[in-house]
Amino acid sequence: MTVMERPEYSPDELRQKAERYCARAERCPMQVRQKLYQWGADSSLRDEIVAHLEAHHYLDTARFCRAYVHDHYFLNRWPVEKIRAGLYQLRLPNDEISEALRQLAESLAE
């Protein structure tokens, strides 16, 4: 039995794959970096592609936080502390986590 080798992608192919990956669903930078690592991108190329995705609005951590909070609270019925822990685990900025949870609290108070 032969071991399948991972295909090698050019930097442009990796950028396009990452754009398609982000276009399918909201992603955070950590998820994209993990996927790029799986595709064989080195550290500097991962940083460059993530910066490109942020500049072209494929990645937006505040938007991701809001979507994560909404989906996990209303669809999965997670408690707020579990949502907060999940967002911290994804290494998102504390101020954006707090803002997304504040918006949830406001929507529940209405």
Image (cartoon, helix red, strand yellow):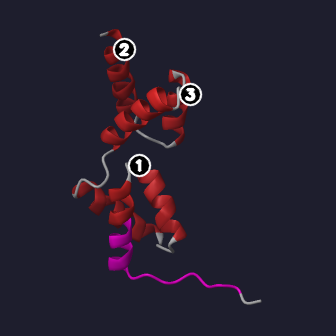
**Measured from the top left, where is residue 41 in percent x and y?**
46, 73
**In screen coordinates, is 80 left or right of 27?**
right
**Measured from the top left, where is residue 48 in percent x and y?**
34, 66
Screen quadrant of the C terminus: top left
Report the residue at 37% width, 48% height from top. 26
Three-letter code, disc 3: Lys
Q: Which mark is residue 108?
A: 2
Nearer-the-camera pick, 16 or 96: 16
User: Where does the magenta region start and end?
Assistant: 3-18
Secondary structure at numbered mark 2: helix
**Measured from the top left, where is residue 25 in percent x and y?**
38, 52
Three-letter code, disc 1: Cys
Three-letter code, disc 2: Leu
Of all residues, the one furthest to the bottom in this rendering is 2
Nearer the camera: disc 2 or disc 1? 2
Q: Earlier in the sequence, mark 1 or mark 3?
A: 1
**In screen coordinates, is 53 left or right of 45?**
left
Of all residues, the one furthest to the right in this rendering is 1
Q: Residue 82 carries which label?
A: 3
**Measured from the top left, where is residue 46 in percent x and y?**
41, 66
Secondary structure at numbered mark 1: loop
Would you identify the image quadrant in which residue 6 lies? bottom right
Pointer 1: residues within 10 angstroms few (<14), some, or many (20+)?
Answer: many
Secondary structure at numbered mark 3: helix
Whether 104 is drawn above or below 97: the answer is above
Residue indicated by mark 1 = 28
Whether 64 is drawn above or below 74: the answer is below
Would you identify the image quadrant in which residue 45 lies? bottom left
Q: Distance between the residues labelled 3 and 2?
A: 17 Å
Screen quadrant of the N terminus: bottom right
Of all residues, the one furthest to the top in this rendering is 109
